Image: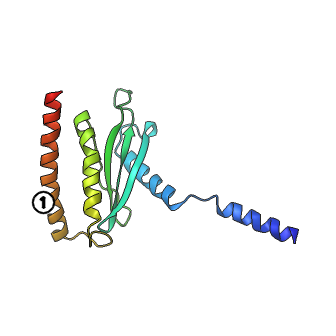
Amino acid sequence: MKKCALLAAMVLTVAGCGPTDHEKQIARVEAGLKEHLKDPDSAKIVVTDVFPMFDGEVACGTVNSKNSFGGYTGEMTFILPMAANGTMWSPSIADSELLSSMLPDDCAFMKAYAQRPGMVGVPAGLEQLTAFSKEYKAFAAKSVSEALEKQRRE
């Protein structure tokens, strides 16, 4: 009986050692983002959100990595769209303080848009992408205008 209990405890311990789905998701995001950095080994990545959109996912967070001169860029925000088949699209990585201050709002817009009925689990057809692009352009124009006005006042 003691042997059975010991064996069961060992099996449960080993089974609990594997990476969780969330950890696998974060690792995929980090790997996809690193493909677009000058010095991927130096990257310090913090994934703040991953959410489903259409038939893929969108990841948001911050990255600090070394530039061509060997210095760290400072913490910059990013948005990384991912297709359902695992393909990583080209990320939006802020290259200025202005853009870095705007991308979190972009991420929030995308997340809110994705929470609408019919926006998750379906392939993004031309109609869906056109509707999204139209709303996003209006949002982005307002966001840029507000950010530039704020920067001008400072």
Q: Tell me which residue sits at (22%, 36%) in the image.
A: 98
- Front residue (pair 147, 37): 147
| Residue 35, visible in the rendered structure | no
108 displayed left or right of 152: right
Disc 1 secondary structure class: helix
86 displayed left or right of 152: right
Where is residue 134? Give x, y as percent.
12, 60
* Residue 51 placement: quadrant: bottom left
Task: From this view, report whether residue 141 is shown above or below residue 42.
Answer: below
* Residue 93 placement: quadrant: top left
According to the picture, the residue beneath numbered tag 1 turns out to be 134
> Looking at the picture, which amino acid does disc 1 mark?
Lys
Where is residue 142? Give x, y as percent.
13, 47
Q: Tell me which residue sits at (44%, 36%) in the image.
A: 42
* Residue 83 placement: quadrant: bottom left
The quarter of the rendered structure image containing the C terminus is: top left
Where is residue 89? Give x, y as percent.
30, 55
- Front residue (pair 31, 93): 93
The quarter of the rendered structure image containing the N terminus is: bottom right
